[in-house]
Amino acid sequence: MKIKLLAFVFIFWFACSIPNLGLGQSASQLAYQYELGDKRVSIPTADEPRVEAFGTESLKVAAEYLELGAASWASGRGCVNCHTTGPYLADATAWHSHFGKPNQEVFESFAKEVPNDIQEIRQAEHNGHKYYPGAFSSVWRSLGLAEWDRNVTGKLSETTDRSLREMLTRQSASGAFVSHGEVEIPHITTDFELSLHAARAIVVAPSWLSELEDPNLLARVERLKRWLASAVPKNNFDRVLKLQLGYYLPECVSASEQEAAMELLNRRQHSDGGWSIRDMSPLEDWHFEMSPKVLSLIQSLPDAGNPQSDPYMTALAIVLMRQSNVPVSDPRIERGLSWLKREQRQSGRWWMHSLYRGNYHYTTYIATVEAMKALKLCGELDRITAIETP
């Protein structure tokens, strides 16, 4: 079946008259959020019109946006990151049966970052905080490769095996992976979130954990489990993530912790059906290093005193409930889904203001991935047949 004109509509929507700027230019020079060849994606704005009718066609536009964004980033920058290629490999690969095979170049951009030789990493210290350099990118790289193996090939690759082994060299003595550096809400926040991503990578990589025999690596895995099971939550975001920990490593979470996390989600749902990531922590508790720029940006938002619902936290709340076996018919999920459906934009995206730099709004990409994940877990993608390619 030939691809419908949907892709051309998508490109037309984002096209504008500003001259093409090369991907090699600095961020301050970019006129678009993403561009690849003659395809350009505009920088998201709050006033983008919402979809007139949510459904199959609008979901296909969303998938086109995710594909183009990931391909653009892999082609022009090639780095492992949290806001585009990371979420793409970690989550968007799970619904490729509906939209076609994921982008091979994105996978290869991660695979080439895996060191050929695994060496012990020296611990660093900054302002009294000890950490292992590169822990963040190593975790996201490993998670992306592990999910590719699970969702696309169905078998563990040697590259993923090596990436996971290398990742564990960046584990702190406590068992955690320290999220060092400037906070980028969401996805670069607490040590618990980063360590949970590391645990997820270990668990989802096909047969990796079940066939692991190296005593040193097994001991590191056990330290990670113990840390996740005993870590004191830094904020409410950590507390609700206990639900996801229970999904991947149920032995690490008590029933009472999961009940408390679910009750917390219930209390944080807004009257419009959505949730807000900014409700999940006092600003100063997101990270042990909060730059004045980030603090000022978030504090100056028009709704700083009463944050509005956002698509990322709304989608994540639905994901957490579905991973905890809450039925789609549950009123909390139904209200959250209704919020997501009416908030999709005609561009296919779910708009979300960047809480890091406030410029290119890459959080919109993360939010779109999470929204699609929530919709997938609620059966909303089941009626979409994968696009056939020549």
Image (cartoon, rainbow, N blue to C red):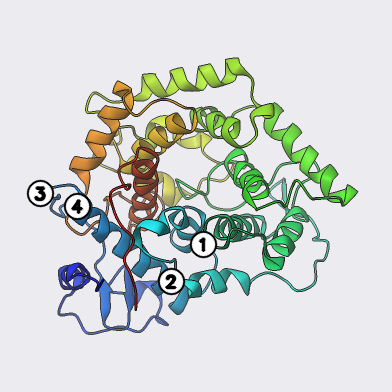
Whole-percent x and y of residue 378?
35, 37
Whole-percent x and y of residue 324?
49, 28
Q: CA distance from mark 2 to mark 4?
A: 22 Å
In the picture of the structure, the residue carrying the numbered disc 4 is 345
Q: CA distance from mark 2 to mark 3?
A: 30 Å
**Kind of residue sitting beneath label 1:** Asn
**Kind of residue sitting beneath label 3:** Glu
Q: Residue at x 32, y 60 (%)?
A: 63
Nearer to the camera, 20 or 242: 242
Q: CA distance from mark 1 to mark 3?
A: 33 Å
Q: Which of disc 4 and disc 2 is earlier in sequence?
A: 2
Q: Which of disc 4 and disc 1 is earlier in sequence?
A: 1
The answer to whether residue 166 is seen in the rendering is yes
In the picture of the structure, the residue carrying the numbered disc 3 is 52
Disc 3 crowd rating (10 Å Cα; few below 14, some 14-19, many 20+) is few
Q: Quadrant of residue 118?
A: bottom right
Q: Quadrant of the C terminus?
A: bottom left
Mark in the foreground, 1 or 4 = 4
The answer to whether 104 appears left or right of 160 in the picture is: left
Mark in the foreground, 1 or 3 = 3
